[in-house]
Image (cartoon, rainbow, N blue to C red):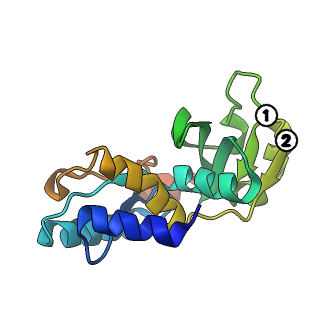
């Protein structure tokens, strides 16, 4: 695929000077994710353009597909606090089908989808917790795979073309982790997240 030509067609299709795709940031701390969401939604709102959420984990699956021809990917990122963000995707034509929704959990809770597909692992969660590769019985793994602008644009382009963009004022971030701190009493009692 000639990605420059595809980006040019994408830009002309939407008559945009700059393509704005908003990624749901499920890998950043809450305040960083919120700042990114507000900034991107604000840019789109000011330009009267729709936004389209693209999950970071799905973008990692896209990177793995390009780099390793992996049609079935368990994307896994280090979530800190001894947890990972994980989701599973299978290729369905030119799109990904979410097989297992994004979640945050300790590595021992992450499960391989119940099917006979040969899964490929991608993301730094596998570097942080290397035992996941064998426990999930993955055919291979790229623990260095990271989401990039190309992957996000490739995921967003057909969705924008299909009219799946949403009004920037109505856009909502996807927060997978809801608890990011302990209360004073919990910390005093020696609790840890």
The percent coordinates of residue 183 (x first, y second) are: 41, 55
Q: What residue is shown at x 59% (from left), y 53% (from top)? A: 62
Task: Indicate whether 63 appears above or below 113.
Answer: below
The percent coordinates of residue 13 (x first, y second) are: 29, 61
Local crowd at mark 2 within 10 Å, few (<14), some, or many (≥20)? few
Residue 69 is left or right of residue 25, and the answer is right
Contact between marks 1 and 2 (CB within 8 A): the answer is yes
**In the rendered view of the protein, which quadrant contains the N terminus?**
bottom right
Residue 177 is left or right of residue 79, and the answer is left
Quadrant in the rendering for residue 31: bottom left
Residue 155 is left or right of residue 133, and the answer is left
| Mark-to-mark CA distance, 1 and 2 | 6 Å
Residue 83 visible, this orientation: no
Observer-nearest of 146 and 47: 47
The percent coordinates of residue 152 (x first, y second) are: 47, 60
Q: What residue is shown at x 70% (from left), y 53% (from top)? A: 122
Task: Indicate whether 159 appears above or below 25.
Answer: above
Residue 176 is left or right of residue 79, and the answer is left
* Residue 118, label in figure: 1
User: Disc 1 or 2, which lies upstream in sequence?
Assistant: 1
Residue 25 visible, this orientation: yes
Which residue in the protein does label 2 denote? Answer: 139
Q: In the rendered picture of this protein, how many numbered marks are placed on residues?
A: 2
Q: What residue is shown at x 69% (from left), y 61% (from top)? A: 124
Quadrant in the rendering for residue 40: bottom left
The percent coordinates of residue 50 (x first, y second) are: 21, 57
Q: Secondary structure at mark 2?
A: loop
Observer-nearest of 12 and 111: 12
Q: Secondary structure at mark 1?
A: loop
Q: What residue is shown at x 79% (from left), y 34% (from top)? A: 118
């Amino acid at each position: 695929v000639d990605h420059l030509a595809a980006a040019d067609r994408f830009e002309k299709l939407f008559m945009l000077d700059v393509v704005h795709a908003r990624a749901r940031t499920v890998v950043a701390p809450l305040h960083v994710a919120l700042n990114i969401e507000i900034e991107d939604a604000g840019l789109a709102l000011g330009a009267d353009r729709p936004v389209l959420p693209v999950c970071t984990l799905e973008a990692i699956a896209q990177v793995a597909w390009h780099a390793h021809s992996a049609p079935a990917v368990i994307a896994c990122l280090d979530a800190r606090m001894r947890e990972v963000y994980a989701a599973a995707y299978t290729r369905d034509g030119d799109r990904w089908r979410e097989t297992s929704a994004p979640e945050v959990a300790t590595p021992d809770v992450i499960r391989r989808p119940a099917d006979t597909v040969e899964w490929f692992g991608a993301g730094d969660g596998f570097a942080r917790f290397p035992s996941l590769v064998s426990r999930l019985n993955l055919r291979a793994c790229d623990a260095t795979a990271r989401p990039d602008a190309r992957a996000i644009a490739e995921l967003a382009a057909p969705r924008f073309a299909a009219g799946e963009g949403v009004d920037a004022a109505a856009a909502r971030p996807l927060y997978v982790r809801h608890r990011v701190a302990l209360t004073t009493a919990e910390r005093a009692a020696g609790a840890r997240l």
